[in-house]
Every structure is written in structure tokens, then in C-alpha cells.
Image: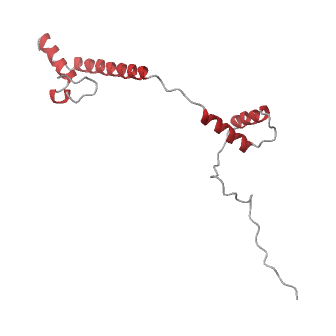
Amino acid sequence: MAETGVVSKKKRGAPPTGKGIQVGERWHPAELTAIDAWIASSPDKNITRAHAIRRLVALGLRVKTESPPKSEDKKRRRDTKQRARELAVDAIDKITDTAASPEDQANRKQRLVKGPEEFQKVRRDRPNRK
């Protein structure tokens, strides 16, 4: 009598390699065109899109970007602080008591812009005064 073997169901797709994590992405036609153009200009004409994308990502990760110089950051922060100070002065001018003397108005504005004495020592935008 002939043996009947168990026929296993075929699995879909390529067999798993167990290497790496699969990442799926949607690409716009313009990006695919650029990738295909890069493949056409490369010396290896038989590479697949997936391999080309891996190579392009590797190239992109190797590129070092320059961080902005620290002086620009300080200047930007200083400009922001100056702008905030100007806005505060404008807001104070709008609510100023016009019946007070000009010296008293200036004194009040200075106290508001500087802040309470308790907080002047902990402010980061001013050097500690001893």
C-alpha cells in the first residue's frame, strides 16, 4: 500500500532571512523618479530599488551637518530678550498712570521691568550682582 504524505500549505512571500527589521514606506512618484535616476547613474546597473534606498540612507547618515555657531545663538537670544523688553515697556506705557509725575512714572516702569527684588537674584538673563 502506498503512503500518503502530508502536504504542507505553501507560505506566501520570500522566506524570512532573520536579518534586520523590515520597514515599509510609501514613496511619491517624484522621489521614485529621483531614486531610479540615481540607480541609472550608478556604476552597478543591476541594483534594486530597495538596495539603492539602503545605500542612499547610509550616504545621508554619513554626512555631517554643521551646527550654528554659538555666537549666533547668543545673538538670537539677546535679540529675543531685547524684543521682550521693548514689548513690556510698550505694555507698561499703555497702562501708566498719567496723573503721576514723570519721575514717578519712570521709577514705576523701571521697577516693573526689573521685577521684584526677590527674583532679581535668580534671573538667568542678568549676571549675579554681589
Front in this rendered view, residue 31 or 102: 31
Left or right: residue 66 compared with residue 101: right
Left or right: residue 10 compared with residue 2: left
Left or right: residue 32 compared with residue 21: right
Q: The C terminus is located in which quarter?
A: top left
Q: Quadrant of residue 37?
A: top right
Determine the residue positioned at 19% across, 25% down. Answer: 115
Q: Position of residue 83 (x, y in %)?
A: 33, 19
Q: Is residue 127 visible?
A: yes
Left or right: residue 75 compared with residue 29: left
Q: Position of residue 73 (x, y in %)?
A: 41, 23
Q: Tell me if residue 107 comes above or below residue 64 in the rendering.
A: above
The residue sitting at the bottom extreme is 1
Determine the residue positioned at 22% across, 20% down. Answer: 92
Q: Position of residue 129 (x, y in %)?
A: 19, 22
Q: Quadrant of residue 93?
A: top left
Front in this rendered view, residue 81 or 126: 126
Q: Tell me if residue 100 comes above or below residue 128 in the rendering.
A: above
Determine the residue positioned at 74% across, 62% down. Answer: 12
Q: Is residue 99 visible?
A: no
Q: The N terminus is located in which quarter?
A: bottom right
Front in this rendered view, residue 48 or 30: 48
Q: Position of residue 3 (x, y in %)?
A: 84, 84
